């Protein structure tokens, strides 16, 4: 009987991490989830770009909003993936913006406006939205105008990791053979775990 109890206890302990949902990132005073790899800056995107470049990273904006169930899903189910955490920490300089926020930002073209006005200017309609920057910035163009990729919506770990990799490897420069959709389809086929995400 003791042996049976020990085996059951071991089985429960092994299943416990799988049964529990992933821990959500902390929620800040603005109602947005906060990851430890997100940067708290003055939101002058020209300065953020320069700092990212000095660290050998790419600037990435993530636009979210309070109460967004898709943002929560992204923080609970996508960002905890070790591959994505590693990409975010090692490759990207991530600045979070609030779709409805009043915090003043400076766009890459020098225009000073609120977060919500910037989101309207950039035609951001969905949260989360990721805006990926090129390695060199054009100060005459807005953030959205010079973005190399814009990813609207919450996607699973596979799609998100593939986008992070596709941008980091600058595959957007020549899409004549393989645009993101083809790249992502190839990555799905090559993934050893067989998952489409």
Image (cartoon, helix red, strand yellow):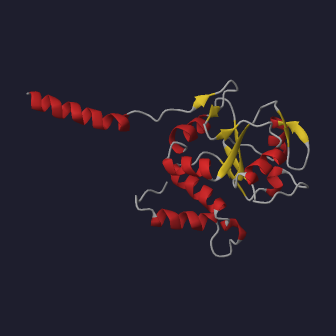
- Residue shown at the point (86%, 51%) measured from the top left: 142
Q: Position of residue 174 (x, y in %)?
A: 70, 72
Q: Give the side of residue 73 with respect to residue 136, left or right.
A: left
Q: Give the side of residue 39 with respect to residue 191, left or right.
A: right
Q: Quick one: quadrant of the N terminus?
A: top left
Q: Give the side of residue 18 with respect to residue 104, left or right.
A: left
Q: Nearer the viewer, residue 56 or 180?
A: 56
Figure check: 75 above or below 195: above
- Looking at the image, which residue sits at the far bottom? 177
Figure check: 2 above or below 128: above
Q: Position of residue 80 (x, y in %)?
A: 51, 42
Q: Nearer the viewer, residue 61 or 120?
A: 61
Q: Nearer the viewer, residue 24 or 68?
A: 24
- Looking at the image, which residue sits at the far left? 1
Q: Position of residue 116 (x, y in %)?
A: 81, 36
Q: Position of residue 5 (x, y in %)?
A: 15, 28
- Residue shown at the point (91%, 44%) measured from the top left: 111
- Residue shown at the point (40%, 58%) measured from the top left: 193
- Looking at the image, which residue sits at the far top? 29
Report the label total.
0
- Residue shown at the point (17%, 34%) measured from the top left: 7
- Looking at the image, which residue sits at the far front? 54
């Amino acid at each position: 009987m003791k042996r049976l109890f020990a085996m059951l206890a071991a089985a429960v302990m092994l299943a416990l991490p799988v049964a529990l949902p992933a821990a959500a990132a902390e929620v800040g005073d603005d109602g947005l989830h906060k990851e430890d790899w997100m940067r708290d800056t003055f939101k002058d995107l020209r300065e953020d770009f320069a700092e990212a470049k000095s660290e050998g990273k790419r600037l990435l904006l993530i636009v979210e909003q309070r109460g967004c169930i898709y943002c929560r899903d992204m923080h609970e189910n996508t960002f905890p993936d070790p591959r994505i955490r590693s990409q975010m920490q090692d490759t990207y300089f991530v600045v979070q913006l609030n779709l409805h926020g009043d915090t003043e930002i400076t766009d890459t073209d020098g225009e000073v406006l609120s977060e919500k006005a910037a989101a309207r200017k950039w035609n951001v309609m969905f949260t989360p939205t990721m805006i990926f920057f090129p390695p060199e910035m054009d100060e005459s163009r807005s953030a959205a105008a010079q973005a190399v990729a814009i990813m609207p919506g919450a996607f699973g770990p596979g799609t998100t990791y593939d986008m992070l990799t596709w941008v980091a490897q600058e595959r957007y420069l020549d899409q004549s053979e393989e645009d993101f959709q083809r790249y992502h389809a190839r990555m799905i086929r090559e993934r050893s775990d067989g998952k489409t995400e």
